[in-house]
Amino acid sequence: MIYGDGIRFRAIEQTDLAAFVAWLNDPEVREGLQMVLPLSMADEQRWFEEMLKRPGEEHPFLIETQQDNIWIGIGNCAFFNIDWRIRSAEVGIFIGEKRLWGQGLGTKVMRLLIQVGFDTLNLNRIMLDVYETNPRAIRSYEKAGFKHEGRKRQGYYLNGKYIDVLQMSILRSEWEESHA
Ligand SMILES: CC(C)(COP(=O)(O)OP(=O)(O)OC[C@H]1O[C@@H](n2cnc3c(N)ncnc32)[C@H](O)[C@@H]1OP(=O)(O)O)[C@@H](O)C(=O)NCCC(=O)NCCS
């Protein structure tokens, strides 16, 4: 387990997959992700098996938060495309329990993920892509310390329109400075 402020990360188990299918079939959750088609249990099972073949550092975490003293799963977050020479990685996050959006959890999760990236994996740069149509995510990344660094113009197609994809990143030096 990796513990943060009212949240924790644990490995994803087979028994979590049904929750993922429910969350990821919700159009509102999916709209911020690179997913456009309905997801079946078989798709999810295949994803799980392929995921286990990837390096351990790229296995997504199940995000849990405490409710009435019980830890419940609410989504996942992960590192991917880790480059060990450049010491950079991309991150992704989703909270599938929509009723918990807008309460600061996404920001806490991202802060903990950044801490794992710099303090445990010894990365130097953490980056992400986010759709311009996702102000909630953009705001939570800004609060966690990410800076805007670029824009892929018309980089994604969503709901009948091309939209821009914003590129954001945080450097280890910036993170250390904010914790000094
Ligand atoms: C993105 C996500 C992880 C953010 O988690 P969260 O718990 O809702 O985020 P937080 O509560 O920490 O922060 C959200 C911020 O956005 C703000 N916000 C919400 N809607 C907004 C809007 N329409 N315009 C501007 N800001 C908005 C909130 O007020 C809050 O900022 P504040 O604390 O300054 O008031 C979560 O919403 C999610 O999983 N969404 C679905 C999947 C997804 O889009 N993932 C990201 C892919 S890049």
Image (cartoon, helix red, strand yellow):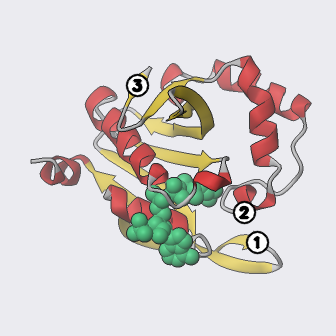
Determine crowd level at label 3: few under 14, some 14-19, many 20+ residues with C-alpha closer than 10 A: few
Inter-mark Cα distance, 2 to 3: 28 Å
**In the image, residue 126 lies at what x, y percent?**
38, 48
Q: Which mark is residue 31?
A: 2
Tell me the residue at 54%/22% (across/down): 55
Give the total of numbered labels: 3
Q: Earlier in the sequence, mark 2 or mark 3?
A: 3
Tell me the residue at 54%/47% (across/down): 92
* Left or right position of 37 against 94: right
Amino acid tagged 3? Ile
Q: Which mark is residue 2?
A: 3
* Left or right position of 88 against 134: left
Number of the front mark, 1 or 3: 3
Q: Are marks 1 and 3 in contact (CB under 8 Å)?
A: no
Inter-mark Cα distance, 1 to 3: 35 Å
* Left or right position of 1 against 158: left
Check disc 1 and report its element: helix, strand or loop: strand
Q: Which residue is mark 1?
A: 158
Q: Are marks 2 and 1 in contact (CB under 8 Å)?
A: yes
Q: Earlier in the sequence, mark 2 or mark 1?
A: 2
